[in-house]
Image: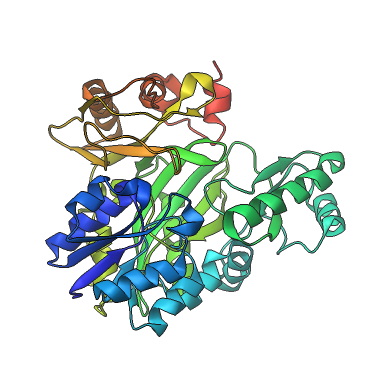
Amino acid sequence: MFKKVLIANRGEIALRILRTAKELGVKVVVAHSDVDAKSLPVLLADEALCIGPASSAQSYLNIPNLLSAAVVSGADAIHPGYGFLAENAQFAEMCRDYGIIFIGPTPDNMRALGDKANARKVAREAGVPIVPGTDALVDVDEAKQAAAEIGYPVILKASAGGGGRGMRVVHNDADLERNVLQAKEEAKAAFGNPEVYLEKYIEEPKHIEVQVLGDGERVIHLWERDCSIQRRHQKLLEEAPSTLPKAVRTAITESAVRLASHVGYKSAGTLEYLVDREGNFYFIEMNTRIQVEHPVTEMITGLDLVAEQFRIAAGEKLAYPQDQIPCRGHAIEVRINAEDPSKDFRPSIGKIETLHFPGGPGVRVDSHLYTGYSIPPNYDSLVAKVIVHASDRDKAIHRMQRALFETALEGPGLKTTIPFHRKVLENAFFRRGAVYTNFIARRMSE
């Protein structure tokens, strides 16, 4: 196992990685921007190094500064968390050049599956169904021709995208040209890569993802999650397992193992699918990193996914055969964002004056917050995740309601998504599992 790891991230995921590293006996260096100097991961780290100002481009995306921090601190490994440089193959290669282990997939894995347009090609090779669509588009004319063949509505996606950025749903030719140009600009600004591709837009699907682990020789799945409750393609609530029929669940998880095995996948990763009303499923992309919603999988399997990432990166082989991966009970996670749901989820910042997180059986909270902490305006609005586990879905819903009732996160002008989640949990359609990606627009429009 490593002696010292540098965490190239911030917030709750930096704290999550720090906790596992300490349990494994690994010393922790946290690289941080100047505005994160008083964040909880920095305060709990064995060492902390400032790598730049608040701007992500000058800090968490600054490869020379991160590598310098790793070299100066004597770290023998880097964990990138999610977002920022987590799926950057060049960064992973540069770590290798400096003799530093990148705790994540190989650069080849990232190039094969991290780029969404290329992942479609790999899925076809592996015999995994994909949504009808294109490879990376050359120009607007090619987009128009493809849309005519596929049929409207279509969706534009950034090849290197994530978090809903660079995505546009288009219903006719008149809007296509404008949206292609806007999607390219947004993709270039967010990911440094302007490539976009086009897919058939499937209306009212479920968004299902499969968690996998690979050691470069063997791949196993850790069951699936339902991530259908989204706003502008960003997930707000996730649960595991899904409510899909057993035959569909089996087919999806088997296809995920087949696809990841096709490229000799190494580390943790997530394959995402759309499932229509008839149970047909289509692979859409793979996230070659740990996911925000990984705790629900940990709750039903009992595994520490970050610890598994550490072990695989250290050269260990998977310790579990597929038939020994349990799927116990049901888990739900809600993302608490510093946003005002009553004002179209407008970002909200401020100093935390009152903070109380829930406890009790089957309740877990992942958060970097503490009383007196000021939420900076420079980064993602995610401030906490509340996760519950129970013997079945109905009990998990009741447990989450109780957990949110106990939660207090307050400060001058500070708003969070807690009231929104309470409404979701009370919704009759959600209660019976009738949840699709248009759930918020159709069932919670008020």
Is residue 303 in view? no
Query: Where residue 438 sits: x, y (%)?
Result: 57, 32
Image-quadrant location for residue 395: top left
- Closest to the observer, 293 or 261: 293
Above/below status of 422 relative to 226: above
Query: Where residue 317 sits: x, y (%)?
Result: 26, 77
Q: Identify the residue at image location x=78%, y=52%.
A: 150
Colouring: rainbow
Quadrant, the C terminus: top right
Above/below status of 375 relative to 240: above
- Closest to the observer, 169 or 178: 178
Image-quadrant location for residue 19: bottom left
Query: Where residue 401 sits: x, y (%)?
Result: 28, 24
- Closest to the observer, 272 or 277: 272
Tally of marks? 0
Is residue 139 in view? yes
Image-quadrant location for residue 254: bottom left
- Closest to the observer, 428 or 48: 48
Q: Identify the residue at image location x=28%, y=40%.
A: 331
Query: Where residue 351 sits: x, y (%)?
Result: 31, 29
Q: Identify the residue at image location x=24%, y=51%.
A: 41
Quadrant, the N terminus: bottom left
Q: Is residue 335 left or right of residue 274?
A: left
Above/below status of 292 relative to 117: above
